[in-house]
Image (cartoon, rainbow, N blue to C red):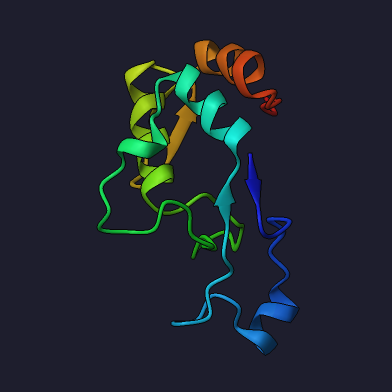
Amino acid sequence: MLTGYDGVHRPEKAMRDRPASHGRDIRYELTDSGRAQLRELGVHADRLPPRRPVVRYCVDWSEHRHHLAGGLGAALTSRLFELEWVRWGAAPRVVQVTNKGIAGLERTLGLIVAR
């Protein structure tokens, strides 16, 4: 779906090289096949507001894990809530994948959700 980086956060390298510091973001591109796959899911990357990058390198502040950021991440998250594939968890900024979401993510994106 994406090209430009392998998506693995390496804390030891990030601290030294600061790849996501201002002006030095790792550049991701959405592939044509990724664009088509997301369109089938109801996410239209070509309709995203231009105020922020479509895809951006970002590491979660609490778990230090790489995640999808930018306009595409927001649009995909919104769509997953609409489909009831995710719901809000008990704590702020926590979401839970529903049983419907486990099946849907595997079927549409090939993602296996650990239970």
Q: Quadrant of residue 103?
A: top right
Name the one closer to the observer, 105 or 51. 51
Residue at the location (33% across, 32% down)? 78
Could you say which is closer to the camera, residue 81 or residue 28?
A: 28
How far across and how far down the image is residue 80, in percent?
Answer: 41, 25
From this view, report whether residue 99 is shown above or below residue 97.
Answer: above
Which x, y percent locates residue 105?
59, 21
Q: Please state if 4 lies on the left or on the right of 30 as rendered.
A: right
x and y percentages locating residue 92 in the rendered image: 33, 46
Residue 4 showing in the rendered view = yes
Whether residue 38 is situated above or below residue 18 in the rendered picture: above
Residue plotted at (58% across, 69% down): 26
- In x, y percent, where is residue 60? 51, 60
45 vs 25, left or right, is: left
Q: Name which residue lies at 42% across and 43% down.
A: 72
Q: Residue at x 54, y 62 (%)?
A: 57
State which quarter of the image contains the N terminus: top right
- Look at the image and tell me whether residue 90 can be seen: no
